[in-house]
Image (tube, rainbow, N blue to C red):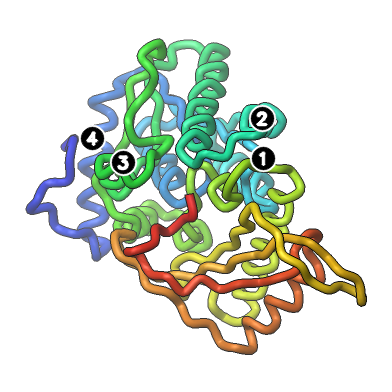
Amino acid sequence: MVYDRRPDDFERITTPELAQKFVDEQMEAIKEQVGERKVLLALSGGVDSSVVAALLIKAIGDQLTCVHVNHGLLRKGEPEQVIKVFGEELGANLIYVDATERFLDKLAGVSDPEEKRMIIGNEFIEVFAEEARKLEGVDFLAQGTIWPDILESEDGIKSHHNAGGLPEDLKFELVEPVKILFKDEVREVGRVLGLPNNMVDRQPFPGPGLGVRCPGAITRDRLEAVREADAILREEFAAAGLEGKVWQYFTVVPDFKSTGITDGKRTFEWPCIIRAINTTDVVEVTVEHLPPELIDKLVMRITSEVKGINRVLYDYTPKPPATVEYE
């Protein structure tokens, strides 16, 4: 059954049985919508697009082509992981596009959060359109839109690159099989589809990537500082046994500097903000209180190993009043 909106009486997917029922329904809906035609999938490698990919592979097999775009805003090691999991292990038709320079050039000097999101979203569509023109018979674009994306867009909180459809000049029809689900439900669906745990339980990652964790106009050096600090954070969370136990944790490097001291000399560098949160539906979010010894280690490593950072701050703000991301 195809839903345009989440029904008020929709039973929340909390068990394998409910997840399997949803999978069976969506497989039939996908087959009915797509027929013998081809689908192009925006595959970021995150939970939502991965589950959509698994659903589509199960429903239509080789009719699906996955496109992974490296927009230069991904986490450290992420493009390589996507290629390994989907291209090598799952055997998907995978096209890898390195569009780093293209995205960063268009984002240069742009500081408004909504304008940044629109540039990233529109450029994604353009990249997909270019790849689609190289293929024959592609009529559909699949996306990992989920219910909170739609709600936040409708409420005017923020725009989402995959909530709102395509520009009129593109003739793709959307395939959005998980758009009425919350994040925890998407994970349940992923489990019954047989996706590996490290994929199903991986942290959510926004479509605009590190672009929303580099507030203000993105510069390459500050973007690299976000990426390196995030890698350290993930490494230390794993070492502390918190991987998979905290819903989401990430770093933000804002566009202002403060004075500090390194090797006895004055510095004027960025702060790094750490955010670690828990939620079930992304509508409300609580803050994870980290052990002091972990905070101390993160401060030591980030300030000593990441170029351009001389302070580490911790964000204790829940949602509401804050949103998950900074932009």
Q: CA distance from mark 2 to mark 1?
A: 7 Å
Name the residue: 60% across, 29% down: 95
Q: Please say if the residues under marks 2 and 1 sit with CB atoms less than 8 Å apart.
A: yes
Tell me which amino acid carries mark 1: Gly
Tell me which amino acid carries mark 2: Ala
Q: CA distance from mark 4 to mark 2?
A: 35 Å
Q: Which mark is residue 28?
A: 4
Task: Describe residue 30's horizontal placement relative to residue 110 as left or right.
Answer: left
Farthest residue to the left: give it: 9
Q: Please say if the residues under marks 3 and 1 sit with CB atoms less than 8 Å apart.
A: no
Name the residue: 20% across, 58% down: 18
Q: Earlier in the sequence, mark 3 or mark 1?
A: 1
Name the residue: 34% across, 53% down: 186
Q: Nearer the viewer, mark 3 or mark 2?
A: 3
Tell me which amino acid carries mark 4: Glu
- Label 2 environment density (alpha carbons within 10 Å; few <14, some 14–19, many ≥20): some
Q: Which residue is mark 1?
A: 72
Q: Which residue is mark 2?
A: 99
Establish if 41 lies above or below 55.
above
Quadrant position of residue 28: top left
Q: Please say if the residues under marks 3 and 2 sit with CB atoms less than 8 Å apart.
A: no
The answer to whether one can see residue 192 in this image is: no
Residue 139 location (% of width, % of height): 38, 16
